[in-house]
Image: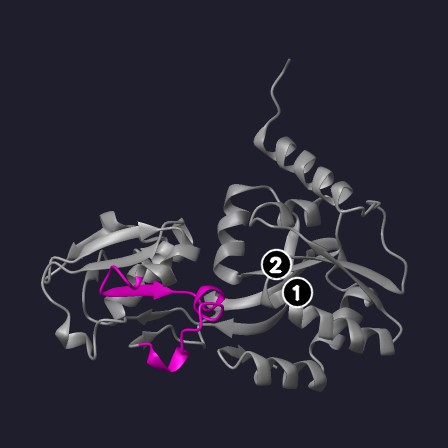
Amino acid sequence: MTSLLPRQLARVLVLACLQLGALTFSAAAVSADKIRIGLNPGPTVDVVRQVQKVAAQRGLEVEIVEIADWVRPNIALDDGVIDVNFFQNTAYLRTQLKRQNLAIAPVASVWSIQSGLFSKKLAKLSDLPDGAAVSVASDVLNGARGLLLLEKAGLIKLKDGAGIDATPRDVVANPKNLKIVQLEGPQLARSLDDVYLSAISPYVYIPAGIDRRTAFVEEDWKDPLFHQVIVARKDRANDPVVLKFVAAFQSPEVKQYIETKYPAFKVLW
C-alpha cells in the first residue's frame, strides 16, 4: 500500500476528526448566514461563544469546530473544510506559510498575548544563581520566544539576527552558565517547582493560576509577531460573510468580555 504524504495524512485526520464529532461539512462556500470557524480548545472557544451571541443578533450563525493540534486548522482552512480559523499568532502563521503551500492570509488582528518569565524561587532576577536551570518551550516558535525573553532579561545573548527563529544553538553568551531545559508547553507551569525560571505563555499560565503581574519580563504587546489573528482563505479575504464575522468579533460586547475575563490579553481594536 502506498503511504500517504504528510499533507494528505493531515487532511484525512481533519476529515476523520470532524466526522467523529458528528459534524458533516462541505467544501463549498457557506451560505450568507453561516460561517464555520476552527479553534483550539481553551480560551479562544470561550471567547468565540460570546462572538456567537453577537453574530446571531446580526443574522450570522457561527459554528465552532474544535481541532486539538496546531497543524490541521490551517490545512482544514486551505481545503475549505472550515471558513476561518483563530488559534495562531502572526509568527506561527509565517512559519506555516514557509513550510506549506497554503492559500490563506490574516484578515484581522484580535489580541496580543505576551509570554513572560516567571519564578517561584526568586524574589528578583539578580538572585538567580550560577548554573541555574531555566525552562523554555520545546517547540521551535515558543522555544525561540523563551530564549528572546531570557535575552531581554539580560541573562543570555543570542547570535545577531537569530530572532524568532532562535534555538539554544544560537546562544553566544551565557555568563551565568544557565542550563536551558526544553519542555512541552503545558509542562512549563509545573516546571516552576524544579527550575528557577520559566518562559510561559498565557495559554499555560492562566489555567495554572499564575498571576501575570509576577512576571519579571514580558514580550512587547506592540510586536505584531505576537498578535493573534483571524485567518481566511485568500480568495475570501473580502467575503461579506467573513467581514461580518470579523465585525461581530470586534464588537464592544466581545471586547468588554475579553478585558474582564482575560486581562492578560491585550485587545487590539
Q: Residue under circle 1?
A: 45
Whether residue 196 appears in magenta in the rendering, the answer is yes
Mark 2 vs mark 1, CA separation in Å: 6 Å
Whether residue 220 appears in magenta in the rendering, the answer is no
Foreground of the two, 264 or 230: 264
Q: Is residue 167 left or right of residue 239?
A: left
Q: Which residues are magenta?
A: 192-215
Residue farthest toward the top in the current orientation of the protein: 1
Q: Is residue 147 left or right of residue 15?
A: left
Foreground of the two, 30 or 23: 23
Q: Secondary structure at mark 1?
A: helix
Task: Quadrant for the C terminus, please.
Answer: bottom right
Residue drawn at the location 19% of the way across and 75% of the way down: 125
The location of residue 104, given as percent across then percent down, is 65, 53
Residue drawn at the location 43% of the way across and 68% of the way down: 205
The location of residue 149, given as percent across then percent down, is 30, 67
Q: Secondary structure at mark 2?
A: loop
- Identified by mark 1, the residue type is Val
Count of residue discs = 2
Cβ–Cβ under 8 Å for marks 2 and 1: yes
Q: Residue under circle 2?
A: 41
